[in-house]
């Protein structure tokens, strides 16, 4: 209504002077979708498999007892005491008593990194990611990692454990994760902090399920 025009302009020539015909879809796509060809000229709307969600949580205080799962003193890094610099993308993860719920379906990468301190004696430490497909009626261990903290007579000896899993979240009401932290000695501390990611969980949506 304001004048002007919009048009599609073909190239000056095609490869081998071939006759190219492109068939458009029957309707507009959804926001953010792009046109894809099947190699025979048929075009369709598809969603790009791009990262649309990233979220990070952390343990805010130390604990010395084993946690199966870690059910308290958890917060989103971006919400921590007004700390600057932390970012997120898309809708956030939510958690209740250490059980994390995904905001949308998709293929998700879940990472768990835990830091440990020990004074005496030596101890093994272990972290695990547990996954349920039936809203917690049953849990399956999908990833875990180990390390050993040996007493060397110093004030503190440190270790870090890391594990990750790529999960297919087809139903956000049923498929959830939780995190365990285990050790063998009462002198072991799993280290948390309210302003830094020392023991933390990272959730990245990689694409559509």
Image (cartoon, grey):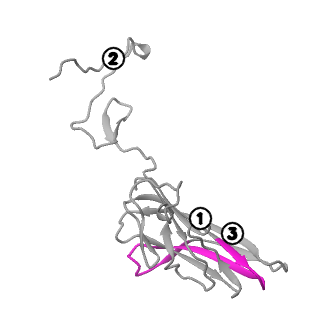
CA gap, disc 3 to disc 1? Answer: 13 Å
Task: From this view, report whether residue 201 is shown above or below residue 86.
Answer: below
Identity of the residue furthest to the front in this view: 82
Task: Specify the segment rendered in magenta.
Answer: 115-142
- On residue 197, which mark appears? 1
**Which residue corresponds to the image point at 54% horizontal and 82% vertical from the top-left?**
68
Q: Is residue 58 left or right of residue 12?
A: right
The residue under label 2 is: 10
The residue under label 3 is: 160
Q: Residues within 10 Å of mark 2 (few under 14, many from 20)?
A: few
Pair 1/2: label in front: 1
Please tell me whether mark 1 sits on a helix, a strand or a loop: loop
Which comes sooner in the sequence, label 2 or label 3? Answer: 2
> In the rendered picture of this protein, how many numbered marks are placed on residues?
3
Residue 41 coordinates in the image, percent (x, y)? 33, 29
Please tell me whether mark 3 sits on a helix, a strand or a loop: strand
Which comes sooner in the sequence, label 3 or label 1? Answer: 3
């Amino acid at each position: 209504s304001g004048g002007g025009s919009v048009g599609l302009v073909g190239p000056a020539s095609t490869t081998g002077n071939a006759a190219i015909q492109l068939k458009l879809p029957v309707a507009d796509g959804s926001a953010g979708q792009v046109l894809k060809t099947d190699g025979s000229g048929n075009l369709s709307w598809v969603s790009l498999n791009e990262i649309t969600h990233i979220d990070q949580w952390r343990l805010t205080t130390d604990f010395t007892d084993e946690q199966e799962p870690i059910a308290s003193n958890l917060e989103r890094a971006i919400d921590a005491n007004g700390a600057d610099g932390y970012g997120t993308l898309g809708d956030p993860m939510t958690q209740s008593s250490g059980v994390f719920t995904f905001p949308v379906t998709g293929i998700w990468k879940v990472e768990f990194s835990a830091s440990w301190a020990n004074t005496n004696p030596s101890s093994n430490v272990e972290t695990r990611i547990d996954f349920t497909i039936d809203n917690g009626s049953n849990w399956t261990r999908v990833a875990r990692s180990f390390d050993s903290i040996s007493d060397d007579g110093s004030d503190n000896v440190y270790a870090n454990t890391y594990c990750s899993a790529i999960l297919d979240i087809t139903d956000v009401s049923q498929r959830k994760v939780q995190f365990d932290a285990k050790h063998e000695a009462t002198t072991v501390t799993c280290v948390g902090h309210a302003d830094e990611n020392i023991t933390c969980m990272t959730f990245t949506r990689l694409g559509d399920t």
